[in-house]
Amino acid sequence: MKNLFSNHLKTGLRNIWRNRSTNAVSIFGLSIGLASGLLIFLLVSYLFSFNRYHAKADRTFWIVTDILEEQPQHLDVTPRPMGDVLRREYPFVESAVRLNNIFGAVISIPVSESEIRKSGPSKKFEESRNICFTEPEFFQVFDSKWLAGRPKRALAEPNTVVLSRKYAEKYFGTSQAIGKVLRFENKLNLTVTGVIENPPSSSQLRYDILISYASIPGFYNDPNMLSTWAEPSTMCWVALKKGAAAHELAKSLSDITHKYYNAADAKKYHFAVIPLSEMFHAPGFGGAPRPILYALIVIGICLVVASCVNFINITTAQAMRRSKEVGVRKSLGSSRRQLIGQFITEIALLCLIAFAIALVITQLNLPMLNGALSMLRADISIMDLLRPNALAWFVLMIVSVIILAGFYPSAIISGFNPVAALKGKLSSQKAGKVSVRKGLVVVQFVITQVFLIAVIVMSAQVKYLKSADLGFNREEILTVKIPGGNMTRQQTFSEQLGKIKGVEQVALGAEPPMSQMHASEPFSYNHRPEKEKFTIKLRIGDMNFAPLFGLKILAGQNFTSNDSTRNETLVNEAMVKQLGLANPGEILGKSITIWGKDKTIVGVVKNFNLDGLRAGIQPAAIFNDHQLNGMAAVKINSRSRSQTLGEIEKTWNATYPEHVYHADFLDDRIEQFYQTENILLGLIQVFSFIALVIGCLGLYGLVTFMAASRSKEIGVRKVLGASQAQLLWIFGREFATLLLIAFLLAAPLGWFFMNNWLAGYAYKVNLGPWVFGLTIGIVAMVTAVTIGFQSVKAAKMNPVRSLRDD
C-alpha cells in the first residue's frame, strides 16, 4: 500500500510538471477562489467574535429603550437610575453597570509653573469615543486584565480614572501611572487609580479612559443628575446570576416601568434586552448585522464553488490528451480503482499547491483588509486559522475541495474504454458529458452576472448619494470645534475669523445641517396642553447659520439678531406638513414649547437633509441658543485655502490656548455617512473581479474541451468548404446560448438582492433595464475576448491533422 501511494505520488508529480502550463492555469484559478474564501472566513469569524471573550458573556445583557410615539425612537441608553435599581431590588441580578460615552473631550497633563519654564506648556490631547464615565461594576461584568490598582475600589470615588496601558504610556511615558493626575475638559483633576491592559479589538467596549461615574454630578454641576428618570441618557448592562433566565430580567423591566413612571409615560417607554453576544449584530445598533455576515458567507461559498467548477472544467478538458495513457494502463491490468487513486492523488497535489498559494495570497492581503477595518482596530491574522474551530473548518474545506474538484474528473478519466482510447477515437461523451460542463459554465456565468449587477447598482447608488442635492451648501465650508458655554469668547473668535482674508462668512452653532447627532425631541405646539405625537430634530445656529449654509427661507424671515433671549426659531417644510397646515405662512408667529421654553416661529426654511439619504426628510427646527454652541462654520475662498486654514488655526490657538484645535471640511464629514457603503462597494468590486477572472478561466477550459472534442467535425466542415467565420459561429452560438440561459437565471436573482438593498434608502437610483443591459454587455464582451483566441486557433487548424486517424 505504501509503495502504491509512493508510485502514485511520483507519477502525479511527473504529470503535473509535464502539463505545467495548463496546471498553472488550474492552480491559479483555484488559489484565487480559495484565498477569497479564506479572507471572507477570517473576516466573518472576526466579526462574529465580538464581545464573546468575556467570562459572563452568556448571561450578560444590554438594556435598550424604545420610545413608542408616532415616530418610534430606538435608543441605546436607559434612564440613569436603571442600573442602580436593578442591583438593589432584584436578587437574580449578579451585577449591573452604567456607562456614559463621551464623544469628544480635552485631556491635559497639569504642570507647575517651574515645569512650564523648563519644558513648556502642558500637553493637550483631544480624545473621542474611547473615553467614558462608568462604575466599579464595569470590571465585575466585563473582563479586563489589571496591571495596577484595585478593581473594586479604582472607580469608587469621584474624580478618579482608570487608563489602558497604551494611554498611560501616551500621557506619562510609562505604564506606572498610579497616583498621577490628568485634567479633564479644563474642569476636573482626575487621579489615576488603575491601569489595565489594552482592550482587544474584538470588543465594542474599547475604552482607554474610564472616569468614575460618581464624577458626573460635579462635572455637570447638577447634584440630582443621577436620580432622574426623565431622559434616557446612560448605557446599562446586567450580568445575571447563574441559572437566572433572560425573561426574568424582561419582566423586571416592565415592573420598573410601571413603578417609576406615571400611566402615560409607562405606555411610552419600553425597555428591551439584547444578549451581549448579539450586541454587535443587533439591527439599528450593531456594526455587523447578521444578514450582512450571512451574505458574506454565501459570497465566499460562491467564489470557492466557482473556482472548483473552473478547476473541474480545465482538468476534464485535459482528459482526451491522456486517453492513450489510460488505455495503456488498462491494457497492462490497472483497475479503475487504481486509476481513480492515481488521478485523485494528482488532483489532491494540485489542490494542496493551490491551498499553499491561497494562504500566501491571504497573508499578503490581510494588511489591506485590516486597513479597511481600521475604525474597528482590526488585527485579523492568518494564525487565527489555528484556533480549534477554525482549524476544523479549514481541514474540512481542504477535504471538501479535493473531493468536489477531484472525484468527477477522476471518475471520467478512469472510465475510458481502452480500445477506443488507444485508437484515439474517444467521443466527447466518454470524456465527460458536454451538458455537464455547460451546466458548470452556466453556474459560473450566473455567479459572475449577479456580482456584476451588484457592482453596477451599488456604484450608481454611492455616486448618487455623494452627488445628490442635500438642500444646503456644502462646498468649501470648514467646521471648527469650539468649547461651549462662554458666549463672549465665542463671539470674539467669530469676529476675529471674519477679519481673515479668504474667510467669506462665519456662523456659530452646534452641528452642520446634516449631522451624525440623531436625537429627536418631543414638543408641544402653540401652547397645546399635550405634546405632539411626533418629535423634531434640532439644529442650533445663529443668524448667520441659514445664509452660510444656503438654507432658503420660504416664509417669514431669518433670526433678527444673535440675541438668544428673543427665543426665535425656524422650522422646515416637513414640520408644517406634519402639523397638518396648508401653507408655510400659517405657522408664522405660533410657538413651540421644548425643554420648558416657548420659542416663537419666525420663518420656514425649505427642507434639507439631516441624517443622510437613508432616511426621508424629518420635521426639524433651528434654535439660536449660544449655550449649546460647539462649532464655528467658516465659508472660505478656495483660491487662498491653505493660507486661510493656517490663519484660522492661528486665531484658534490665540483664543483657546488651553484646548486642542480640531477642524473638518463639511464634505469630509458628509463622506463619513457613507463609510459602510464605500466598504461594501469595495468588497463587492473585488469579489466581482475575482468571479470574472475565475469565470474566464472556466470558459478557457470549456472552449479547450470543445475544440478537442469537435476537432473532427471542424475538419470535415473545412474539407466541405466551411469558411472561418462559419466555424467561429459554432463556438459563438454555443456560448451565446449559455450566456443567455445564465442571464435569465441571474437577472431575477440580482434584481431581488439589489431591490432589497435599495429598500433601506429613502432616496435611491432606479433599478431599470439599463442595469441588466450593461451586465450582459460586459459579460458578452469578456466572453468574446476569452474564447476568441482558442476558437480562431481551432478554426485555423489543418483538417488533415484531425482526420488522419480515420
Image (tube, helix red, strand yellow):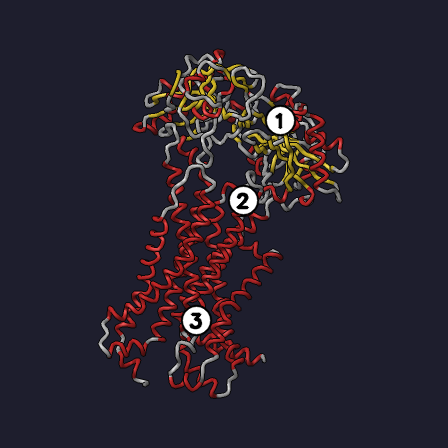
The quarter of the image holding the C terminus is: bottom left
Please say whether residue 211 is visible from this viewpoint. Answer: no
Q: Nearer the viewer, mark 1 or mark 3?
A: 3
The quarter of the image holding the N terminus is: bottom right
Measure how far apart labels 1 and 3 are at the Cα level.
69 Å
Tell me which label, 1 or 3, sits earlier in the chain.
1
In the image, 233: left or right of 599?
Answer: right
**What's under tag 1, amino acid-wise?**
Leu
Q: Nearer the viewer, residue 570 or 163?
A: 570
For mark 1, what is the residue?
190
For mark 2, what is the residue?
288
Q: Nearer the viewer, residue 466 or 731?
A: 731
Within-10-Å neighbours for mark 2: few <14, some 14–19, many 20+: some
Residue drawn at point x = 33 percent, y = 28 percent: 641
Q: Residue 319: where, in percent of width, then height?
A: 42, 76
Q: Residue 634: where, in percent of width, then height?
A: 39, 24
**What's under tag 2, amino acid-wise?**
Ala
Tell me which label, 3 or 2, sits earlier in the chain.
2
Measure how far apart labels 2 and 1 are at the Cα level.
35 Å
Element assignment for label 1: strand
Tell me which label, 2 or 1, sits earlier in the chain.
1
Element assignment for label 2: loop
Within-10-Å neighbours for mark 1: few <14, some 14–19, many 20+: many
For mark 3, what is the residue?
315
Measure how far apart labels 3 and 2 are at the Cα level.
39 Å
**What's under tag 3, amino acid-wise?**
Thr
